[in-house]
């Protein structure tokens, strides 16, 4: 099939995937707290409600920046499965995340501003890793595009177990699971009242939610890269990783951003860096 | 089709309550009552909220805060007064600093009686509030 078809399919189907994942997540979290939890389609109801609600425009910049955030998230995914160079995709991914920080940073409220600063810290912790990860995947498979990696004769995961472990760690942040004092997840009583989105209402908040769904789908696509011989196996691995994230989220509800920044750098450097170094040395 | 009935997000504000009603409001989130079943989220942010749920009565100090919170909520929005204090001033009605129930400052849509209001009746009040939310949305549309 033409890579363009994959790109279009991603843009159309990723929100469905992300929304369902969020629904499953909320039910799983509720069950872990011995509650029943909301219906599976709850994230879609929330999105529909936000679109019907009034949107308070605190300044003329927030909406275009948030549209940029969703747009570039969708573009990242489309470029990823559409066969664009993987390193380039990593940079567009970072740019998409940066738009959210800018949107929150333009608002004059201290909550929003602190949220933006902390999101920046998260970016600082996570983005260098994604570049390292994609570079390592390109290196072991001798390919530079998604399709190239998928058709490679080398299976990535056995070669890069350290990188995969580090990915699991970084995904905790990217899936907005931990730390609690930055995450914009749906838990009651967030520290800083989900600072980042504190001044976004109605459809503005819906954009953030949509972008997050795209982001989940992009992360799932990354996991498939590790299990490049079989897409179902990759999706299964993503399910396992996600289940682990939900468990971590429910058991480390007091992890703070300082810990996350330090530990992410330590873990990614040790696991991913060590793994890549070993590959070079053992050659 | 409207999604308001499926996703009511609540902002809980404690005016001058004795904390009795607040404990009951929080009890609604616990495994026994689990209001998240109805899509309820306790947001803590007026800009995300659809329902302003107030416990306790209006006094000289919090009157501005209550008005401010209400103004910050985007339309459509409803106010649910929980407990005797929020409905009328309750047991504190004649205290020197108390002005009365929440309806002294805001248009209250649902009154939930009780001292303290029981979690079951608070959930009933929220469901009534959802109905009011739907009506307001239809009017503005
Ligand atoms: S109604 Fe009763 S329980 Fe509730 S805040 Fe007033 S005094 Fe306390």
Image (cartoon, coloured by chain):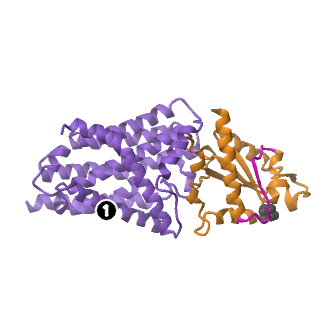
Chain colours: A purple, B orange
Which residue was labeled with disc 1? A267
In the picture shown, does residue A60 fall above or below A171?
above
The answer for which chain carries disc 1 is: A
| Quarter of the image that includes the C terminus of chain A | bottom left
Q: Residues within 10 Å of mark 1 (few under 14, many from 20)?
A: some
Q: Residue at x 24, y 57 (%)?
A: A232
Q: Nearer the viewer, residue B48 or B128?
A: B128
Q: Residue at x 25, y 43 (%)?
A: A81
Return the x and y of residue A136 as percentages of the image width and height. 19, 52
Q: Nearer the viewer, residue A74 or A46?
A: A46
Return the x and y of residue A66 as percentages of the image width and height. 46, 37
Q: Taking A150 as reference, is B115 left or right?
A: right
In the picture shown, does residue A137 fall above or below B119?
above
Residue B116 in magenta?
Answer: yes
Q: Nearer the viewer, residue A153 or A42?
A: A42
* Quadrant of the image occupied by residue A200: top right
| Quarter of the image that includes the N terminus of chain A | top left
Look at the image and give the residue range highlighted in magenta.
B105-118
Q: Residue at x 69, y 49 (%)?
A: B129
Residue B68 in magenta?
Answer: no
For ligand 1, the image quadrant comes to: bottom right
Q: Is mark 1 within 8 Å of ligand 1?
A: no
Residue B81 appears anywhere in the view: yes
């Amino acid at each position: 099939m033409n890579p363009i078809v994959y790109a279009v399919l991603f843009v159309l189907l990723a929100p469905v995937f992300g929304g369902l994942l969020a629904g499953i997540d909320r039910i799983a979290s509720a069950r872990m707290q011995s509650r029943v939890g909301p219906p599976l389609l709850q994230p879609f109801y929330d999105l529909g409600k936000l679109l019907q609600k009034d949107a308070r425009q605190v300044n003329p910049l927030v909406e275009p920046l948030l549209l940029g955030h969703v747009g570039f998230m969708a573009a990242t995914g489309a470029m990823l499965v559409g066969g664009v160079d993987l390193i380039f995709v990593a940079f567009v991914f970072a740019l998409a995340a940066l738009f959210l920080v800018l949107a929150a940073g333009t608002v004059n409220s201290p909550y929003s501003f602190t949220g933006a600063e902390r999101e920046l810290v998260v970016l600082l912790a996570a983005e260098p890793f994604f570049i390292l990860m994609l570079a390592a995947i390109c290196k072991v498979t001798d390919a530079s595009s998604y399709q190239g990696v998928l058709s490679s004769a080398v299976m990535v995961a056995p070669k890069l177990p350290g990188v995969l472990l580090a990915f699991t760690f970084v995904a905790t942040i990217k899936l907005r699971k931990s730390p609690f004092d930055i995450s914009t997840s749906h838990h009651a009583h967030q520290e800083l009242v989900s600072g980042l989105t504190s001044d976004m209402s109605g459809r503005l908040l819906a954009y953030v939610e949509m972008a997050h769904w795209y982001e989940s789908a992009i992360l799932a696509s990354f996991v498939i890269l590790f299990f490049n011989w079989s897409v179902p196996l990759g999706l299964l691995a993503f399910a396992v990783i996600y289940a682990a994230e939900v468990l971590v989220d429910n058991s480390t509800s007091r992890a703070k951003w300082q810990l996350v920044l330090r530990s992410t750098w330590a873990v990614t450097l040790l696991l991913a860096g060590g793994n890549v170094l070993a590959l070079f040395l053992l050659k | 089709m409207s999604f308001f009935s499926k996703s009511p997000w609540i902002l809980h504000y404690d005016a001058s309550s004795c904390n009795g009603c607040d404990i009951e409001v929080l009890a609604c989130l616990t495994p026994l009552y689990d209001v998240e079943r109805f899509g309820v989220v306790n947001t803590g942010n007026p800009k995300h909220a659809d329902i302003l749920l107030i416990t306790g009565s209006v006094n000289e100090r919090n009157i501005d805060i209550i008005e401010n919170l209400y103004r910050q909520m985007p339309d459509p929005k409803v106010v649910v007064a929980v407990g005797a204090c929020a409905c009328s001033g309750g047991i504190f009605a004649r205290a020197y600093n108390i002005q009365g129930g929440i309806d002294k400052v805001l248009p209250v849509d649902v009154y939930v009686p009780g001292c303290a209001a029981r979690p079951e009746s608070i959930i009933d009040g929220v469901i009534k509030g959802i109905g009011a939310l739907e009506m307001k949305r239809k009017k503005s549309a």
